């Protein structure tokens, strides 16, 4: 898997950059980390299954900024198209692919493992096996999704918001934060783009 990440970086070298103040659009197929504004932890997954609910791969949030399991790649929504480097607009539907396991950020009407009043968020499927439960709407201000601004993700099928519940797990993922879907926006629903590799927007000739 490390080899895959290196090959990705080399093959896209001509079109990748770290975001700058002059061009901080979030673009399709960029590989990013997402930090919760309220808690300061990063959206995370790993090959550890939930012991309840769907039994799918767990999604949590961690404080460690260097964890490779916190990388997510932006994909178009299921059955939609998005060119490499296309700017994501506020209101667009996307999928987030977990880079190390190849699964997509997912939700459904299962109950969250710790906060029973909320909805479970998991990582599920693959590029060959994806469904509308992987689709999320980007909620942000203005026209385009900017790296420097806060955003929220609303699940397309259930309408829930990607949030932190304020609960933490015990073993085997001690201290990791519970990520859930909430019926409405909460203090744990705001996120920002953190570290990552950005695919630059390519200006089209007029």
Image (tube, helix red, strand yellow):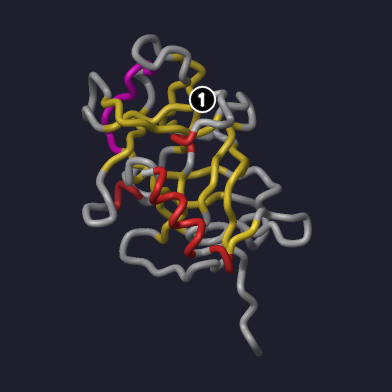
128 vs 150, nearest the viewer: 128
> In the figure, 150 relative to 8: above or below?
above
186 vs 198, nearest the viewer: 198
Residue extending furthest bottom? Answer: 206
Q: Position of residue 4 (x, y in %)?
A: 39, 51
What is the span of residues highlighted in magenta in the rendered image? 108-115
Q: Position of residue 48 (x, y in %)?
A: 30, 26
Q: Position of residue 199 (x, y in %)?
A: 57, 62
User: Which quadrant does the N terminus fall into?
Assistant: top left
Q: Position of residue 92 (x, y in %)?
A: 49, 60
Q: Is residue 46 magenta?
A: no
Q: Residue at x 29, y 32 (%)?
A: 57
Q: Is residue 112 magenta?
A: yes
Q: Residue at x 59, y 35 (%)?
A: 35
Q: Quadrant of residue 193?
A: top right
Q: Quadrant of residue 36?
A: top right
Q: Callout 1: 10 Å neighbours few (<14), some, many (20+)?
A: many
Judging from the image, what secondary structure is the residue with disc 1 in? strand
The residue that label 1 is drawn on is 62
């Amino acid at each position: 898997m490390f080899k895959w990440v290196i090959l990705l970086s080399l093959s896209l070298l001509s079109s990748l950059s770290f975001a700058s103040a002059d061009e901080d659009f979030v673009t399709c197929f960029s590989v990013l980390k997402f930090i919760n504004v309220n808690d300061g932890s990063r959206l995370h997954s790993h090959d550890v299954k939930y012991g309840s609910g769907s039994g799918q791969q767990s999604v949590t949030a961690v404080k460690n900024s260097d964890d490779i399991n916190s990388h997510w790649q932006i994909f178009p929504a299921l059955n939609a198209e998005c060119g490499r480097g296309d700017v994501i607009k506020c209101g667009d539907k996307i999928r987030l692919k977990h880079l190390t396991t190849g699964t997509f950020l997912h939700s459904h009407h299962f109950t969250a493992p710790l906060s029973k009043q909320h909805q479970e968020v998991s990582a599920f499927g693959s590029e060959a096996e994806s469904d509308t439960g992987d689709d999320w709407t980007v909620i942000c201000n203005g026209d385009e999704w900017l790296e420097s601004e806060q955003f929220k993700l609303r699940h397309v099928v259930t309408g829930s918001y990607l949030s932190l519940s304020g609960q933490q797990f015990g073993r085997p993922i001690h201290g990791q934060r519970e990520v859930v879907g909430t019926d409405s926006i909460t203090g744990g629903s705001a996120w920002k783009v953190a570290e990552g590799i950005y695919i630059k927007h390519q200006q089209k000739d007029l």
